[in-house]
Amino acid sequence: MTAAAAVRGDHATKPAVTLAVAQLRAVNPYRYRRYLNRAGLYASVIILISPAILFFFWMLSLSLKNEADNTAYPPVFIPHPPTLANFIDVFAKNDFLTYGINSVIVSFSATGLALLLGVPAGYGIAKTNATKAAVLILIARVTPGLSFLIPLFLMFQWLHMLGTLTPLVITHLVITVPIVVWIMIGYFEGLPVDLEEAALVDGCNIWQAFRYVAVPLARPGIMVGMILSFIFSWNNFIFGVVLAGRTTRTLPVAVYNVLTFEQISWGPLAAAALVVTAPVLLLTLLMQKEIVAGLTAGGVKGG
Amino acid sequence: MSATTAGMPVAPRVRPTGKRNYARRYWLFAMPAAMVVVAVILFPWLFTLVMSVNDWKVSGNVYFVGLGNYQHLFRDPRFLWAVARTLYFTTAAVIAPMLIGVWAAVCFASNFKFRGVARTIFIMPMMATPVAIALVWTMMFHPQLGVLNYLLSLAGLPPLSWVYNSTTVIPTLVMVETWQWTPLVMLIVLGGIASLPIDPYEAAVIDGANGWQMFRYITVPLVWPFIVVAAAMRIIDALKAFDTIFVITNGGPGTSSETINMLLYQTAFGYYDLGYASAMVVVFFVLILLVTGVLLRMRRWEHGI
Amino acid sequence: MIGRRTLLTGTAAVLAMPAIVERVGAQSAFDWKRYQGQTIVVSLTKNPRADNLQQHEKEFESLTGIRVESEQMPEQQQRPKMVMELASGRPSFDVTHFSLHVSKRVVGSGRWLVDMRPYLADRALTAPDYDWADMSPGARRAATQPDGRIDSLPLETDIWLIYYNRQIFQQKGLAFPKTFDEMLATARKLNDPANGIYGFVGRGVKNANVPVWTSILLGQDQETVTPDGKTLLTDTPAAIWAGEMYKSLLRECAPPGVVGFNWNECQTSFMQGKVGMWMDGVGFTPPLLDPKVSKIVDHVGFGLMPAGPKAHACPVFTDALGIPVESKVKEAAYLYCQWATSKAMLLNLVNMGGGASPRLSTYNDPTLMKNSPFGQEWLATLLASMKIARSGLPEIIPVTEFRDVFGIALSNMVGGADVAAELRAATTAFKPILEQSLKT
């Protein structure tokens, strides 16, 4: 049973630690310790998730409060009355619809291309144990963003492409392709060889074996790769700051623009921040099982 | 640059397939991706190398200075301080998430009610847009009107200057980084814990080992590779941290939170000193490679290779 | 002929803009509509000047038939972007709004902006009532490069003054200070941290904070470089005196966290009624008198920059509009620049409190005197300041780096560092940069 399945909570196995603890309990005469452990566990979990809960609650609160509530001290936690004016303000004063569409186009394109390029690459690398190719992908991960920005900016200027979204899509590939490749290596290596070998014996060439056997089997991995690559492309800030023009800005860049001169307009700022991050948070909520499975399974391959 | 999840290169595994003549063909699968990555990174890198041996300011002429930029770099106190700060920030921004992340992984490995919900909430900071998050943190840090100082006052504690004081600024930024990236550490280590085999534990229980001994002699060594992977990713991301620092402090107050990456941006886009900035990029990249190299060695060591 | 008639008509236009637009068109032989149908892209910095321009944009469009696509961007982004785009040779804009005190020498040495002298002299391109000579000598000088090229039109001359909270002053029974030493004493007396009241606020964040220091320095009749721009004067006793004053004000009498404050944080603190005095540019007035955001609408006072031991001066910083040489619609862009810096528009600017007009005639306008939008004290302080205005920042190419290096030193001082040591270290650090820039 793979770690991915274990984490998903499939009923066939329990994580080894739980089992070990259960066995310990069986031999441990001091049963009350079990309750103490349990209480400790719940307390720990609550402590661990409180910062996240408090933060997102505060973000929501700021965005729903009007100006007076936002500048009040002591701070007002529950807005009375809550107002949607900040959100309307965000869309009215800034071209957030355009920027949102830009973000969508860039992230979808970068993810789509990454899948086209990365899934086969992951397969090829997994089959040949090509550590060199993997290292190449790793270089992309390790390089600081600013090291490509200036030359790429100059190149795109020279090619007259800065008014379009193409430069952004191309640079975002540096983020999305490594993610897809890394996840796919993990999934393809975990696949049983038998089905593919059967296909090859039956006369398929390796391309067909890949396309009709391996890919369908690795669909969960593709799903995870797609989600993660979309999220990290969406969240990217620095490429947008340098390469985006007036109409080709993405949301993270736009939200940064809302800051700086409207310091005490915390309402619109929080509303803008929420609008920018809501799509990926929503995606996380809906796809959390796949995401967790993907990242933890990928972790296995690191071992 | 926000983190990606590409990880360490895969250790070679012995596989039963003997179709070696397919090896070359399988290479073709990886070609397009490799080409794209090379094109988007290689050209800029060559250009950066060329720029680094020139003196090129945006408004002036370009002229060759050989290793002049590099020499200046190693004698430049502002750069050297930036290196020191980067190491300080990175160390703290790795240790804290690692400790909390491992603890969290152990907690989430156990089954409990609402585990799924708790886990979802826990990973949300990692998925949220760093810039947006940083803006909200900035609002929370406001010395007079911010909610954090208010919460402190409720607990009877004096208000803190958070990011407005040169001593507390880096710990504060580390706190934000920790809040955001601990979930990644947790997930990776969780993968390790979840994949632990049962047999060693059964044998140990039979042999009369207690909980602590099992943890120390079975769990830790088996989970160690995952911990190293998580640490490696954290180190690389912390070295390159940009979005959060840029939005919250922009290197301030003064230069107290100016890491190498921040100084790089300022040199290129504030002072338009592209030649010098390029040299800085090269040195920065070498630094990251060195650290990654050391980590790779550490991993191989553990495996006895 | 330009005379009282146009001036009066212009003033009435504050209330009915379309009227003047047709008037000007009707009176001159030059044709506003000569380039109709073209589109220009205008890159603006986010501030009240830009608000003024955008508010009246439709009038320009109907006046000339030229379509305007304008956008405001925060200055931290707009400035480097502008330079990068100009340097690369393919700017995305036809008109750029920029600060002369930040970018003048950089754009000048790169020769990226169009020399306006031929345009100004061209009767077919410049409206007869534009009157370049109406611009104050200081403004004209600011817009002129060392080699004589005029590559921008001044849009606003931002003088610095002291905003003060009359209510806080009255509560303590204090008068507005006339000298810097008095200001420090007053700030100390007003300071009441236990009740959340602070005597003074000024920018503490690096780069932005340098003008606060240079304002104080002008009181010693000294600037930060010699007039020829070749030697630094930043470690002289006068500079150290100004540094000590800055350190005392921000360390002892300012709100906590001031070392991270730019003008907007200062403005916020002041608007919340927590601060006695705020030293900054006059262009930030409008929100202070806006009841929707300001808690002290009825208590805002405007004071002249205090005098120092040797001189009484205040710094002035000029914003301007320029046209890149690569623009394909240079003449249409020039019509926009001209319109934006015309007498009518600059009068609008002053009336909406967006700053001080670089034109002398604006201050002779009769209705302005009577219906000053922010009260007589504001207008009086503005006029008095214009008389004692001097350059607030050195006119050198690496001015951003200057502001960074000395800004860092100033921030460190607020944190407790020794003033003389910081200034000397910063001067030593910056000297090679200045020398390097003089070679190119």
Image (cartoon, rainbow, N blue to C red):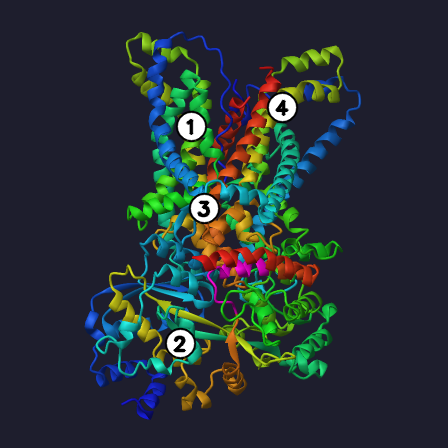
Q: Which residue is mark 3?
A: B275
Q: Which residue is mark 1?
A: A181
Report the chain holding disc 4.
B
Residues at circles 2 and 4 in contact by the CB criterion of under 8 Å = no
Report the chain holding disc 2.
C
Residues at circles 2 and 3 in contact by the CB criterion of under 8 Å = no
Q: Quadrant of the C terminus of chain B?
A: top right
Residue type of the residue flagged with mark 4: Trp
Q: Quadrant of residue B290?
A: top right
On whether residue C394 falls in the magenta region, the answer is yes
Report the chain holding disc 1.
A
C-alpha span from label 2 to label 4: 70 Å
Q: Residue furthest right?
A: A30
Question: In the depicted view, which residue is nearer to us: C136 or C272?
Answer: C136
C-alpha span from label 2 to label 1: 60 Å
C-alpha span from label 1 to label 3: 34 Å
Same chain check for tags 2 and 3: no
| Element carrying mark 3 | helix
| Element carrying mark 2 | helix
Q: Which residue is mark 2?
A: C140
Same chain check for tags 1 and 3: no
| Element carrying mark 1 | helix
On whether residue B37 falls in the magenta region, the answer is no
Question: In the depicted view, which residue is nearer to us: B213 or C340?
Answer: C340
